[in-house]
Image: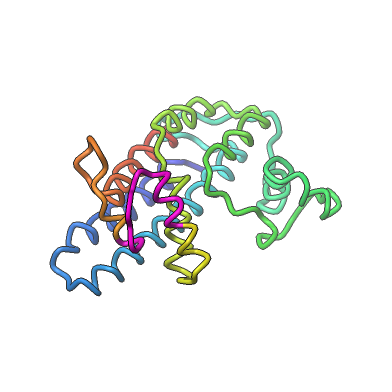
Amino acid sequence: MNLGRLCDATQYRLDRLHKLYDNIGTLTRPEQGLQLAYISIELDNLNICALREFTISTVRGARTTTGKKISVNNVLETEEEIGAYILSIVNSVRYSKLKSPSRIKRTDEPTMRDPKEIEKILTAIGASNLGSLQNALALNSNIFRDLKFIRHFYAHRCKDTFLKVTKNAIAMGVQNSNHPDDILRHVVAGRGHTVIEQWLMEAKLFYQLLME
């Protein structure tokens, strides 16, 4: 097992999403909205999948992109065992309700969008690559905090998700947004990039540091 393959796959997908964004100016306004929705949903899916695969590979003692073999204090092999261990760390209440199983089905795994939850897992299992995760977290990207609100709106497009995304926009410093498209097009102060472009660039650096 090697995190290099996961890193390459993640960077490829991010590059593809960035190219879609770079070409957005050639589309009509309605088409741009559809493209922004697609990019947001796919970026959120990428985060969920990459963080899950990173965590499983770490627990299994994979090699980092620098060639170092990860050591842990409790090696688990099957995804069902690892899933149960992850659930016991990030959602102990649900784990207890399932009667503290040694294995769980994929459908019972928690959906992890927050790398700080991964930090809890790596700390608990004594993973030697914890420092790489902490280096990535030091970027202080808000993608893992804010993207989910926009993703949920595009996926469900209801009043509840709209209210949540507009409320979160204020916390992001985006005022008077009439639609999530406006949030993604907002130019980040002092950065010169739109929100979505900034997220794509930060994600590339985050996963590069994470896999080292």
Nearer to the camera, 207 or 80: 207
User: How many labels were placed on the picture?
Assistant: 0
Nearer to the camera, 25 or 71: 25
* Vertical order, 126 against 116 (above or below): above
Q: Position of residue 137 (x, y in %)?
A: 45, 32
Residue drawn at x 83%, y 53% as measured from the top left: 97
**120 lies left or right of 149:** right
**166 lies left or right of 185:** right
Q: Position of residue 5 (x, y in %)?
A: 41, 47
The verdict on residue 174 being magenta is: yes
Residue drawn at x 40%, y 48% as measured from the top left: 170
Q: Residue furthest front?
A: 176
**56 lies left or right of 134:** right
Residue drawn at x 40%, y 51% as measured from the top left: 169
Image quadrant for the C terminus? top left
Q: Position of residue 8 (x, y in %)?
A: 36, 47
Give the magenta part as a residue range: 165-181
When asked about the image quadrant of residue 29, the answer is bottom left
Residue drawn at x 66%, y 60% as measured from the top left: 106
The verdict on residue 183 being magenta is: no
Nearer to the camera, 1 or 41: 41
